[in-house]
Amino acid sequence: MCHITKTVRTVDYHTAGEPFRIVVDGLPEIDGKTVAQRRVFAQGSAEIDEIRQLLCREPRGHADMYGGFITPPDDSGADFGVLFWHNDGFSTACGHGTIALGVWAVQSGRVEANPDGVTPVTIDVPSGRVVAHVRQVAGVVTAVVFENVASYPVARHVQVQSSRGDVNVDLGFGGALYACVPASALGLEVTPEHYDDLLAIGREIKWALNDSELARHSDDDRLNGVYGTIIFDDLGDTPDGPHQRNVTVFADGRIDRSPCGSGTATRLALLADSGRLAPGQVLTHDSIVDTRFRGWVEPISGDARGAVIPHVAGMAYPTGEHTFILADNDPLTTGFLL
């Protein structure tokens, strides 16, 4: 039995080509004192999950839709909270979504903003507290810098048996756990022509590691599991620092159209740990559709994990506002995925 009886209103953005659907009205109450607790509640609530399905399945969405439910913050130190969702459930982190939320909060008046300067928008997410630093010039948003939670390397040179032979991957945490592998080690390049092969091997690597001991978070079991696989081309160095192009395959076979915000944070942590990215240097990070993020790190003194605070610069743009309904006699109910 479907529980959706109200209209659901959203404001949609894209960040570097990746969609982000913000639900502003039509949600039932999501129980919990913190965003992390609300994520657990949402995962077990048929009523909440039906709204997720309605918005990211055809005919109202698509298999690659991404979005968020706005919630109260954990405490007065943040402006609001968010539960991130996609076609396979609720994620722990989303950098491109944080960038979109920063733009939305300023443009909608949710957060009082400096029309000629930078406004911090502080957001509680399941993996912690993040900040979108939103720059305006004459009242127009021109750029956002996403400041992530502490990010760090987890394991190096982990051998995975795959349909393309044994490959060595690095694991890193950027709000979620990612496996990283050079495309050249798979006989591929990060281009649209290799889309199907990249998706298939990305899923394979994720699921090969997802239940391993390496995928257990040291402090919070709610963050367990490999969220995605980052497959990258190394394009050498610019005068500012490394240049890479990546595709991130996450959830159960989703390909990020952007360079992936939390994935970029993970790459920053791994590059800093290897000595490839020094403080003051910038990673130029391109996507499979040639959009771009730029990232740099702030070291954390004395952290035993080698953690850094990643900063990822990008921009989001509104694409539309929507009011969704589910007719009582609609046989497709919350929709379908292809």
Image (tube, rainbow, N blue to C red):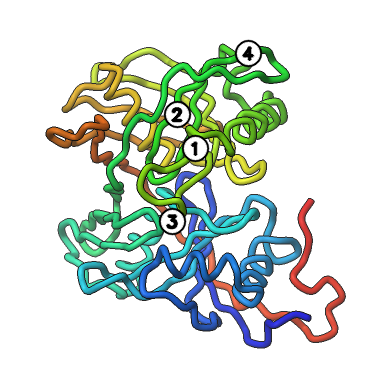
Q: Position of residue 325 (x, y in %)?
A: 68, 80
Label 1 – label 2 distance at C-alpha = 9 Å
Q: Tell us which disc is closer to us: 1 or 4.
A: 1
Residue drawn where x is 54% and y is 80% of the image = 27
Label 2: element kind: strand
Residue assigned mark 1: 215
Amino acid, disc 1? Ala
Whether 298 is drawn above or below 11: the answer is above
Label 1: element kind: helix
Whether 12 is drawn above or below 17: the answer is below
Q: Earlier in the sequence, mark 1 or mark 4?
A: 4
Q: Earlier in the sequence, mark 1 or mark 3?
A: 1
Amino acid, disc 2? Leu
Q: Position of residue 333 (x, y in %)?
A: 79, 74
Q: Tell us which disc is closer to us: 2 or 3.
A: 2
Label 1 – label 3 distance at C-alpha = 34 Å
Q: Is residue 182 left or right of residue 299?
A: right
Residue assigned mark 2: 171
Q: Earlier in the sequence, mark 1 or mark 2?
A: 2
The crowding category of the residue bearing disc 1, from other C-alpha atoms within 10 Å (few below 14, some 14 to 19, many at least 20), is many
Q: Earlier in the sequence, mark 2 or mark 3?
A: 2
- The disc placed on residue 317 is 3
- The disc placed on residue 166 is 4
Residue 289 visible: no
Q: Tell us which disc is closer to us: 1 or 3.
A: 1
Residue 230 visible: yes
Label 3: element kind: strand
Residue drawn where x is 30% and y is 70% of the image = 74
Residue drawn where x is 27% and y is 32% of the image = 305
Quadrant in the rendering for residue 337:
bottom right
Amino acid, disc 3? Tyr
